[in-house]
Image (cartoon, rainbow, N blue to C red):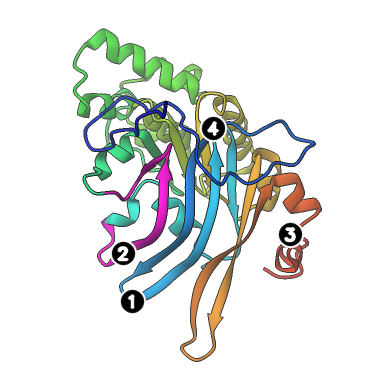
Amino acid sequence: MDQPEPNLATSTQLPKAAALQDTPPQDEVYAPAGSPVFDAQGVSIYYGSFRAVTDVSLTVYENEITAFIGPSGCGKTTVLRTLNRMNDLIPGARVEGGVHYRGASLYGTGVSPIAVRRRIGMVFQKPNPFPKSIYDNVAYGPRINGERNKAKLNEIVERSLRQAALWDEVKDRLSKSGLGLSGGQAQRLCIARTLAVEPDVVLMDEPCSALDPIATGRIEDLMHEIKSRYTIVIVTHNMQQATRVSDRTAFYSVLRDEKSDTRTGVLVEYGRTRQIFEDPRDSRTQAYVTGRVG
C-alpha cells in the first residue's frame, strides 16, 4: 500500500520516507542510497521574465551531505532556496517543473511555506544571531511553535547546543548576548537554533565563507556528526570542502546568451563526490575541478 503524502499545509509531524520514481542507478562500488528526500525534475527558476536557472533534475538522499559547487552566478544558492521556498520571499520569483519532498509537491496547492520551513531549516552565509541571549536564540523557534514548558525548553536548548558542539563553550553564559560570540561560535549557535525545531533537512548556504580555517574545521566536523540524524545540502565555493564533507556533488555552470548578455545557471553534472572530482563525465566539470576555469 502506498504511504500517504506528508501534509505540508498543517501537519507538524515529519513524514516517513517515501519511495520516488526514476531514481538514478547507483555505482556498484557504493552501498545503495537511502530514501529520496528531494526529487527535482526539469526545474527552472525565474525572477520576473529572467530565467536564473534552467532544467535542473537531481535527487537528494536521506542522511547524506550533498554539495552544490560552481562559479559565481551559476544558480547554486537559487536552487538551494527553492528547496525550502525561501525564493517565495522575492517578488516575481517563480518555479517551473517539479520539486518534491518525500513524495509531496513542495509547490502544490495548499502547501504552507511556513510548514515547509519548519521541516527544512536553513543556515545562512553570514552568522546572524538574534540580539538576544544565547539561551533565547536557541529557544526562539520552539517558543514560536508553542512550547512554554521551562523544563522542556531547557532540555531543547542543551540538546541543540550539544548537537552543534557548542554547549561546553557557552553553558556557563547562556544569559549573555549571542552577539558576543566569535564568528565560528555564532555560526554554530545559528546551527543550534536551526536544530532546535527538529527539522528533517538542514540547508547551508556557504556557512564557512566568513570563518577562519579552525572554525571551518569545526563546522565540517559538526556536519559529519549530525548527518546520521539530518539530511544536509550545502552550497560551497570551496572545492576542497566539498571533497571533505559531501557524499554527492552537483556542479553548476553558466549559459551566456550572447545577444542579450544574460547568464542562466545550469546543472552540468551530478553524482558521487569521488566520481565528480576524480572521473567527471563532462568536460566542463573537468575543467572546473582541475582549476582550468573558474
Residue 171, magenta (yes or no): no
Mark 1–mark 4 Cα distance, whole angstroms, equals 35 Å
Query: Does residue 29 appear left or right of residue 270 in this picture?
Result: right
**In front: mark 3 or mark 4?**
4
Residue 89 sits above or below residue 180 on the image: below
The three-letter amino acid code for the residue at tag 3 is Val
Q: How many marks?
A: 4
Q: Position of residue 128 (x, y in %)?
A: 37, 43
> Foreground residue, 127 or 143?
143
Query: Does residue 240 appear left or right of residue 14 in this picture?
Result: right
The three-letter amino acid code for the residue at tag 2 is Ala
| Mark 4 Cα-neighbour bin, 10 Å: few <14, some 14–19, many ≥20 | some
Quarter occupied by the C terminus: bottom right
Quarter occupied by the N terminus: top left
Q: Which residue is mark 1?
A: 49
Mark 4–mark 2 Cα distance, whole angstroms, equals 30 Å
User: In the rendered structure, which segment of residues is drawn in magenta?
Assistant: 89-108
Residue 289: which numbered mark, if any? 3
Q: Earlier in the sequence, mark 2 or mark 1?
A: 1
Q: Which residue is mark 4?
A: 35
Q: Which residue is mark 2?
A: 93
